[in-house]
Amino acid sequence: MIALTGATGHVGYVLHHYLQKENMEHKVLVRKRTDRLQNVEQIVGDLTHQQSIQQFVNKVDTVIHSAAVVYPRYGENQDVYNVNYLCSKNLFEQAKKAGVNHFIFISSIHSMEVPASGIFDETAALVMDENRSYDYSKAQMERFLSQQNGMKITILNPTSIIGGGDFYFNGFNQLFRLIHSYRLPMLTQGGFDVVDVKDVAKSCIFAVRNEVEGKFILGNTYYSIPEIAKMYGNISQKLITPIKLSTSIMKMLATFTDFVDKFSKSPLPINSYSINTLLELKNPISHQKAVNNLGFNPKVIHNSLQDIHKWIENEELILD
C-alpha cells in the first residue's frame, strides 16, 4: 500500500492517475473529499492533524510526500516553514513509527544553490538563506532526511514542471495559460530547465517498484522564455507579439512589483524572486544520475506542450 500526499496538486494528481493505471494500491490525504480523485481511499485531514497522519500511514509500505506550500517570493514565512519542513518531518517520524519501509520526498531544484561554475548536479550545496522561504524549507527537510536511517529514503528534485493536470497553473504553466488567453502583454529575458510532470511521476513509480534510494535531479532541457513561449504559440495557434523586456527594465519592474506584492495574497508573476530565478541559471543542469538509476527518459518538449494545450482547452489529461 502506498500513501500519497498532495494528490490535488500538479505532481500528486498526475501520480495518482499513474498509480491507478499501474494497478498500484494507494490512499491519499485530502483536506476534504473531492470528486477529482476517483476510486481511491481518501483520508480527510492535513499535515497538521496528528490523528489523520497516523491513520494515513497505518499499514503502509511506501509514503510519497508530494504536498507543499509553493511560495515564489522573498521573505521569511512561518506557514511555509511549518508545512514544508516541520509537518513533513512529523510525517516522516510517524511513518517510521508505523513501520513504513520507504519514504519518497518530492523536493525541488530550488532547494539547492546554483553553483558559481560547472555542472549543476546533486552535489550542489543546500540553500541556507531563510529569506528564501520555499527554497529553505525544502532544503531543511533534505538536511533532516540525510541524517535518518532505518527506512529507505528517496529525494527527487524536479526542475520547472510543465504539463497537464495542473489546476493551479504554477510556473511555466501560468505562462502558457496567459498565451492561450491572449493575456501576455510582455515577455521577460532568462529561462529555466523544464521537465514534464509525467516524467516525474514515472520516476517516482520506478523508485517505488525498485526501492531506489538516493537524491536525484529530474530535468530535461533549458529553454528561454521567448523560445518556449513561441513554441507553445505555434502549437496552440495563438499569435503572440508581446513586448520583450530588457534585463534592466525587468529588474526595475520587479522593484515596483515587490512593493505591491507585499499586499497581495498570492505572489505576482513578476517579482524579484521570479526574475532572479530566470536570470541566475547559467549552468547546465545534469539529470544523468536519474537516467542511470531511475530509468529516467525525459520526453520531447513538443509533446509536453501539446499535453498542456489539451489540458488548458478541456482539462484532458493524457497518460502515456
Image: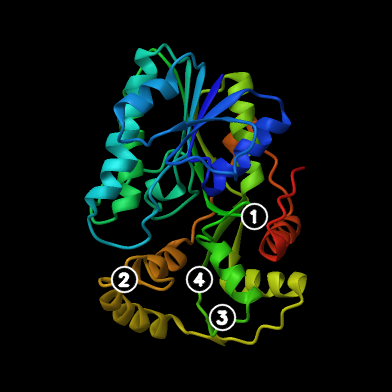
The residue singled out by tag 4 in the image is: 190
Q: Earlier in the sequence, mark 1 or mark 2?
A: 1
Q: Earlier in the sequence, mark 4 or mark 3?
A: 3
Q: CA distance from mark 4 to mark 1?
A: 20 Å
Few, some or many C-alpha atoms within 10 Å of disc 1 (few <14, some 14-19, many ≥20)? many
Few, some or many C-alpha atoms within 10 Å of disc 2 (few <14, some 14-19, many ≥20)? few
Q: Nearer the viewer, mark 3 or mark 2?
A: 2
Position of the N terminus, as image quadrant, is top right
What kind of element bears circle 1? loop
Residue at image position (34%, 51%) is 134
Q: Earlier in the sequence, mark 3 or mark 2?
A: 3
Q: Earlier in the sequence, mark 4 or mark 2?
A: 4
Residue 230's mark? none
Q: CA distance from mark 4 to mark 2?
A: 25 Å
Few, some or many C-alpha atoms within 10 Å of disc 3 (few <14, some 14-19, many ≥20)? some
The residue singled out by tag 2 in the image is: 264
Mark 1 is on which residue type?
A: Gly
Residue 238 picture location, percent across and down: 72, 79
Residue at image position (41%, 80%) is 250
Residue 163's mark? 1
Q: CA distance from mark 3 to mark 1?
A: 19 Å
**Quadrant assignment, res 31:** top left
Mark 2 is on which residue type?
A: Ser
